[in-house]
Structures are given as C-alpha cells and as structure tokens.
Amino acid sequence: MSFGSTASGRVNDLDRFKRALLRLDEENAKDPNLELSEDKQGPRELLYAHRLYGWVERLAPNASEVLFLAARSQHICRWMIPRSNYEMTRPGYLKWRNELKAFHARKAGEILREVGYSDEVIQAVQALNLKKNFPRDPESQILEDALCLIFLQFQFADLAKKTSEEQMINALRKSWNKMTPAGREAALKLPYSENERRLLKLALDQN
C-alpha cells in the first residue's frame, strides 16, 4: 500500500492516517470492474485512487493530510452508483454526477469516523469531495489539477476513439480551463500519441 513518504510528515497521527488509507483501499478493492495497469489487472477504483493520490503528491508534496485523504476517497465505491441507473440525457448525467459526489462524501465520512477522525477533519475532506470551495480553495484546485491529469494520462486515448472530434475538443478545453499553470505544465509533459497531440493543440488554439 502506498501512503506517500511526503504525506507522512504532515499528519498528526500516522497510524490513524495509515488505517484510513487501508480502509479506503479495502472498500475500493471490492470494485468488480478490472483495469489493466503495467500488465496486471486490478480493481478500477483502487487503481484510480492510487493514481489520484500520486498526482496530488507530485503536484503538492507538502499538501495537508485532509487533501491526501480527499484524494484517496474521491471516487470511493463509485461502481455502486452506475451511470446506467439514470436517463441517458444531459439532466440525467448531471443528476448522476451530483448524487455520486454526495455518495462519495458520505462514504468517506463513514470510514474516517470509523478510524477516529474528528468531525472537523471529516467535514474538510467532504468539502473537497464535493468541490464546495472550488476554485477559491487552493487545495481544491490542486485536487482538480490531479483529476484533470488522470483524465489526460489514462482516459484521453480511449475516449478519443469513441467520441466525435468536436466533443473531444470541447472536453479538453473544459479540462484545460479548470487547471492551474502548474497543472498545465505537468499536462504538457505527458506522453501523447500523434492524434492526441493534434486534438490537444486544436483545443488550446480555440481557448
């Protein structure tokens, strides 16, 4: 289990922090959806949580304990509320996203309370889960950068294969506009295919 060497220096109770990450990982390990990573298959949301945590650590090694907990719990048990349960319309999509965020925040709160975190810490983590103070809160902005980088690094290629060019460019522009200069700098260093670079250039040229 990865809990981050930098994060360990910013927590009040390292054992509690490790227990929290372990419990979050245990829940995400129940995801029946598998994803391939480095020639190994693993639960999709467990992999996502570790990737997101890793990006937060790269972007802000001295981030708070709250931010690291929010990163690990951002998509906790996401498979339990599938998109197919909602109408395949824009309003249906928005309802799904809003109910997902509330579910993640509630589930994260239950686990953090279980391992002994205070209501104050839990509420701060949930505010990040819910993006309550985005983009005013600097830590919400770091988390958003990390979420966008996950999209660009691991989801961009597959989405480009099944999405129209116009829709893809629009998605890229929306992601880019939510990112900080530091996040954009990291994004430009990612390895892209020729087609992905072309689409990204088209999106940025339209900004």
Image (cartoon, grey):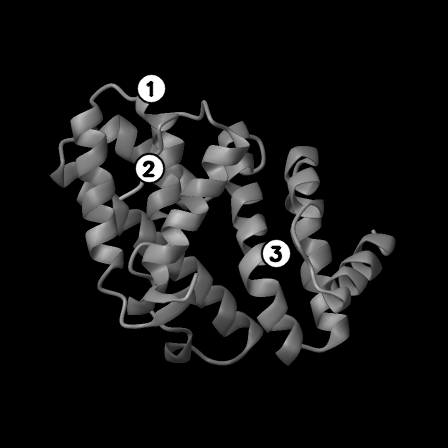
Q: Are marks 2 and 1 in contact (CB under 8 Å)?
A: no
Mark before the other along the chain sequence, 3 or 1: 1
The residue pinned by badge 2 equals 69
Dot placed on the residue nearer the N-terminal end, 2 or 1:
1
Give the residue at x 67% y 62%: 171
Q: In what element is the residue under mark 3? A: helix
Q: Is residue 21 above or below residue 166?
A: above
- The CA span between labels 3 and 1 is 29 Å
Task: Tell which of 136 and 67 is nearer to you.
Answer: 67
Q: Is residue 133 visible?
A: no
Percent position of residue 137, x then y: 52, 30
Farthest residue in the front direction? Answer: 39
Residue occupying the point 66% across, 46% down: 187
Q: Residues within 10 Å of mark 2 (few under 14, many from 20)?
A: many
Left-right relation of 180 to 33: right
Q: Which residue lies under the disc numbered 1?
A: 9
Q: CA distance from mark 2 to mark 1?
A: 14 Å
Given residues 179 and 54, the one toward you in this image is 54
Q: Earlier in the sequence, mark 2 or mark 3?
A: 2
